[in-house]
Image (tube, rainbow, N blue to C red):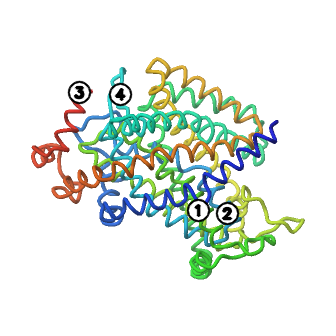
């Protein structure tokens, strides 16, 4: 029975993430939005980074958490196993060229991430507890006010609930317990108990508690990981140009992966690069829009741009560090004692161990993976919470938090190969209604974005200045009416 389920999920995942459905839809939507928005991810990146990472707040704006906390909550959900194991998997199967396609996915995905975060704020509501509630489950229904919009919203919401328990919980807890048991001989049940208690303690406080934890944890873990990667790249600086050359060359020619995997074609490099790129940064899935909707922001454009930097940090920085370390150290060609290619799950750890003195590399990857996975649990708990609230109402939120925390123990103490396939399927199914909605609402996104950026291209306007120059603009008046009505 389990074998049949595994086979079915494997076939479904292969189709959904194959070259005929999600890959062209994700890349096509990102490219289309890039064109309609005038390359916003390139021309506004500096201003967006300045607002999100340095100023961090929009004084006087309505919302539950700061823009920086919304950014770190979304980063918490994405900077996880995808940045460590996912990159290694892409390189192991697709060769070094897969990293190039992860970059392309990230670059066009920034426009998708901007668009969904913009819509998350633009159509957010306020729930019974007085908290902001937004994301595809709201903007698909409110932005496309017909039966089709409602169907898209319900589909996204259902898939989001299932995905939150899969990729956002079971698999992450399993990754933490397996790594701690392998590296430090910590019993999986003990990891499960500690994780469950800590997760529950954070979740009881809601988005404000999650925002505080991720704002403190995420920057530290990313910076430490990047410093370790940079050390390896500096030590091997002579190999970096050749590694970059290999990546660009193999992206368009295909190459043989390690361990005797013959003739990895270009389509495999593209397929695994795009699929693992999306797995890493979630651009187009709609999940980050849920965190963005809680932000204290003076205008949807401002939070959209801040959220856009999440994909830049996740893919262009963290994924690049992991990929270059693997390629420059030659670990993607490493084999085990039997002459077979080493498992992708071990590849990043092997690369850092090879590049850093002593056991530092092993420790950094183990601790980094554990912290990344833990933060992913926190971020996805909020996504699942908002989805369940859409389905069952506010009364279901606290029971969901308790159940979600208890499921962490199950993930930490159980082998879950089938759950990884299930998670891939749910992630893909989440993206489908969201991408369709982004295409339908692309005109509104482009129009309202241009209307704001004409007045505030560097994102430095105060709340009072925004109210003055936006007064009378139909999009502004519509958003303010929506905010006050909630």
When asked about the image quadrant of residue 230, the answer is bottom right
The picture places residue 34, in percent across and down from the top left corner, at 36, 62
In the image, 445 versus 79, the foreground residue is 445
Q: CA distance from mark 3 to mark 4?
A: 14 Å
Could you tell me which secondary element the residue under label 4 belongs to?
loop
Q: Are marks 2 and 3 in contact (CB under 8 Å)?
A: no
Quick one: label 2 or label 3, which is nearer the N terminus?
2
Quick one: label 1 or label 3, which is nearer the N terminus?
1
In the image, 101 versus 129, the foreground residue is 101
Name which residue lies at 47% across and 53% down: 283
Residue indicated by mark 4: 131
Residue indicated by mark 1: 228
Q: Are marks 1 and 4 in contact (CB under 8 Å)?
A: no
Quick one: label 2 or label 4, which is nearer the N terminus?
4
Residue indicated by mark 3: 485
Name which residue lies at 36% across and 36% down: 294
- How many residues crowd around disc 2 within 10 Å: few (fewer than 14), some, or many (20 or more)? many
Could you tell me which secondary element the residue under label 3 belongs to?
helix
Q: CA distance from mark 2 to mark 1?
A: 8 Å
Q: Are marks 2 and 1 in contact (CB under 8 Å)?
A: yes
Q: CA distance from mark 2 to mark 3?
A: 53 Å
Q: Are marks 2 and 4 in contact (CB under 8 Å)?
A: no
Of tags 3 and 4, the one toward the viewer is 3
When asked about the image quadrant of residue 478, the answer is top left
Residue indicated by mark 2: 352
Q: CA distance from mark 2 to mark 4?
A: 42 Å
Q: Is residue 224 above or below residue 235?
A: above
Name which residue lies at 45% across and 56% down: 311
């Amino acid at each position: 029975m389990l074998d049949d389920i595994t086979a079915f999920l494997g076939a479904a995942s292969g189709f959904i993430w194959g070259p005929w459905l999600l890959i062209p839809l994700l890349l096509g939507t990102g490219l289309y939005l890039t064109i309609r928005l005038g390359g916003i991810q390139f021309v506004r990146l500096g201003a967006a980074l300045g607002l999100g990472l340095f100023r961090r707040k929009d004084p006087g704006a309505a919302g539950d958490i700061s823009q920086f906390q919304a950014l770190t909550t979304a980063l918490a959900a994405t900077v996880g196993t995808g940045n460590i194991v996912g990159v290694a998997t892409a390189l192991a199967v697709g060769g070094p060229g897969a990293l190039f396609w992860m970059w392309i996915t990230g670059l066009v995905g920034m426009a998708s991430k901007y668009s969904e975060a913009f819509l998350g704020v633009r159509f957010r509501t306020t729930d019974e507890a007085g908290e902001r509630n937004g994301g595809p489950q709201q903007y698909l229904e409110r932005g496309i006010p017909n039966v089709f919009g409602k169907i898209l919203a319900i589909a996204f919401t259902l898939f989001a609930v299932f995905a939150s328990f899969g990729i956002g919980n079971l698999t992450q807890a399993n990754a933490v317990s397996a790594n701690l048991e392998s590296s430090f001989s910590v019993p999986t049940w003990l990891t499960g108990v500690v994780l469950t208690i800590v997760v529950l303690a954070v979740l009881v406080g809601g988005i404000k508690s999650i925002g505080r934890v991720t704002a403190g944890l995420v920057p530290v873990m990313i910076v430490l990981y990047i410093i370790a990667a940079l050390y390896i790249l500096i030590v091997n600086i002579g190999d970096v140009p050749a590694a970059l050359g290999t990546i660009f060359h193999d992206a368009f020619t295909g190459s043989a992966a390690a361990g005797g995997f013959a003739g990895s074609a270009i389509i495999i490099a593209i397929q695994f690069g795009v699929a693992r790129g999306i797995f890493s940064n979630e651009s187009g899935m709609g999940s980050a829009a849920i965190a963005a909707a809680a932000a204290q922001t003076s205008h949807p454009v401002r939070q959209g741009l801040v959220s856009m930097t999440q994909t830049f940090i996740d893919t262009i920085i963290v994924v690049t560090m992991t990929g270059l370390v693997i390629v420059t150290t030659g670990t993607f060609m490493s084999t085990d004692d039997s002459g077979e290619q080493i498992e992708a799950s071990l590849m990043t750890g092997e690369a850092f161990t090879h590049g850093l003195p002593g056991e530092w590399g092993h420790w950094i990857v183990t601790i980094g993976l554990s912290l990344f996975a833990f933060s992913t649990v926190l971020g996805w708990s909020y996504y699942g919470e908002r989805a369940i609230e859409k389905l069952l109402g506010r009364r279901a939120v606290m029971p969901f938090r308790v159940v979600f925390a208890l499921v962490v123990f199950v993930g930490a103490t159980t082998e879950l190969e089938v759950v990884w396939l299930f998670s891939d399927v749910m992630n893909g199914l989440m993206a489908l209604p969201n991408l369709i909605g982004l295409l339908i609402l692309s005109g509104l996104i482009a129009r309202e974005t241009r209307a704001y950026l004409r007045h505030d291209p560097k994102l430095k306007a105060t709340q009072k200045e925004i109210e003055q120059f936006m007064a009378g603009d139909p999009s502004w008046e519509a958003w303010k009416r929506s905010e006050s009505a909630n």
